[in-house]
Image (cartoon, grey):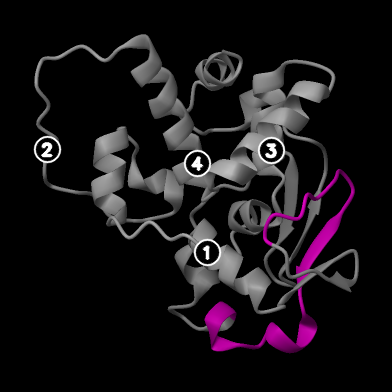
Amino acid sequence: MAVNRVPYLKRCRSLGIEPAYLGIDKKSTRELKRSGRKISEYGQQLREKQKAKFIYGVLEKPFRNYYKKADRMKGMTGENLMAMLELRLDNVLFRLGFARTRREARQIVDHKHVLVNGKCVNIPSYQVKAGDKIEIKEKKQSSPRYKAENGILAATAGRAVPEWLEADAEHLSGIVKEVPTRDAIDVPVNEMLIVELYSK
């Protein structure tokens, strides 16, 4: 699998993203020095796509497939795209506060710690649906990874859970109450520019 090894904070600076959107509790003291050159329309569209791919940790081919599916669905293509990215299993784990970052959430899913409606799922891109119950396996819940003072739950205690999810931190479980609307997704991406880019 392709891996981008550019440091996270450096990529955040170049794309103009706050590290908090990735679950990273750090801030870079460096400032990005750009020339006064204006970014072209295509450059702006490309940048928005790169931001979305970086935040959700999705590579180009799967991202394009998400766009194609979103385009075939009813409603606004851009809003459909953002909802599909939010409903990835790794993102839902991150949103519930059971992982510090989406990258850590992918690892938790890969290691078969997660049940969806009582069945083990180890595919980070798995699309959850409204009404689905997501939980950490009972035999994994006592792991220091989750329960220790420096564990995940302690690190994510102050993070707000979106209103389209219901989290039970004590039992490490959560329910997807509904498909998120664009207003409920706090990601700083202009999805209309992504649609313009792909519709050329």
Quarter-wise, where is residue 168 in the image? bottom right
For marks 1 and 4 on the same chain, the one whose residue lies earlier in the sequence = 1
Label 3 crowd (10 A; few <14 / some 14-19 / many >=20): few
Q: Quadrant of residue 163?
A: top right
Q: Earlier in the sequence, mark 1 or mark 2?
A: 1
The residue that mark 2 highlights is: 31
Residue type at mark 3? Asn
Cα distance, mark 4 to mark 3? 12 Å
**Looking at the image, which residue is at 59% across and 59% down?**
97
CA distance for labels 2 and 3: 35 Å
Residue 162 visible in the displayed image: no
Q: Which residue is mark 4?
A: 53
Residue highlighted by disc 1: 1
What residue appears at the point 12 percent right and 38 percent down from the top-left corner? Answer: 31
Mark toward the start of the polypeptide (4 vs 3): 4
- Looking at the image, can residue 119 be seen? yes
1 vs 2, front mark:
1
Q: Earlier in the sequence, mark 2 or mark 4?
A: 2
Q: Is 135 in the magenta? A: yes
Residue 178: name its quadrant: top right
Extent of the magenta region: 124-146
> Is residue 147 or residue 47 the one in the foreground?
47
Q: Give the Cα separation between the discs numbered 1 and 4.
A: 15 Å
Amino acid bearing label 2:
Glu
SS label for mark 1: loop
